[in-house]
Amino acid sequence: LSGSGKSTLANALLVRLLELGTRPVTLLDGDVVRKHLSSELGFSKEHRNLNVQRIGFVASEITKNGGVAICAPIAPYHHARREVRDMIEQYGMFVEVYVSTPIAVCETRDRKGLYALARAGKLKEFTGVSDPYEVPEDAEMRIDTSDISPDEAVQRIVLKLESLGLVRPHN
Ligand SMILES: Nc1ncnc2c1ncn2[C@@H]1O[C@H](COP(=O)(O)OP(=O)(O)O)[C@@H](O)[C@H]1O
Ligand SMILES: [Mg+2]
């Protein structure tokens, strides 16, 4: 959901992976992609899926060439997430992190004032308020940021990457 912590965690993870320095790392943040790669798209199911497929394509090219792509979009539909997973698993590993922060917490944060607009009916097709979110059932990880710090959350992701053999354990 918006405000769940995707960008915060993705940026912190980027810093950690750059410090580890094993491979080139690219961050594809939701808002940045919306601005530069999907600027003509809206928020219908079709356009949301197209947005996710574009991110997945770029990430698959990065994966193919030995890099790491950290992707932090809202990806609300199971089918599109599955397509992207299949595309990327041809070349490497796909680790899905479901940021499961409850909407009540996201709404309290309301960083960009979007929930207020959505509740007032001034912003349509808002995920979790007036647009669907299909909860991931096959995510490798689930992180609720309401009760842990960004540092702790990123530490959990790094431990998962270690356990998958994607990052070398260190003390
Ligand atoms: N543990 C946490 N992890 C991530 N973000 C947190 C956490 N605790 C509080 N926050 C705050 O929640 C907000 C999340 O915003 P953001 O990362 O932009 O969300 P999204 O990209 O999912 O819309 C930020 O203001 C961030 O500082
Ligand atoms: Mg974001």
Image (cartoon, grey):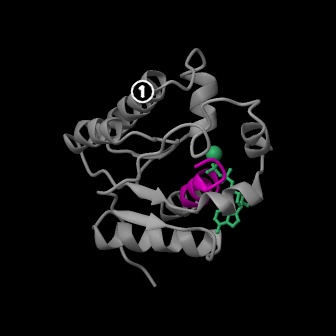
Where residue 27 appears, as percent x and y from the top left, is: 53, 44
Type of amino acid at the residue the image marks with label 1: Arg
For image coordinates 38% across by 45% down, the residue present is 67
Q: Nearer the viewer, residue 20 or 100?
A: 100
Where residue 146 appears, as percent x and y from the top left, is: 63, 70
For image coordinates 47% across by 45% down, the residue present is 133
Neighbor class of circle 1 (other Cα within 10 Å; few <14, some 14-19, many 20+) is some
Image position of 117 (left or right of 36): right
In the rendered image of this protein, does residue 138 appear above or below residue 35? below
Pointer 1 residue:
54
Residue 25 visible somewhere in the drawing: no
For image coordinates 22% across by 44% down, the residue present is 89
Helix, strand or loop for the magenta stretch, by majority: helix
- Whereabouts is ligand 2, in terms of quadrant? top right
Q: Which residues are magenta?
A: 1-14
Q: Nearer the viewer, residue 83 or 20?
A: 83
Q: Residue furthest left?
A: 90
Residue 53 visible somewhere in the drawing: yes
For image coordinates 80% across by 44% down, the residue present is 113
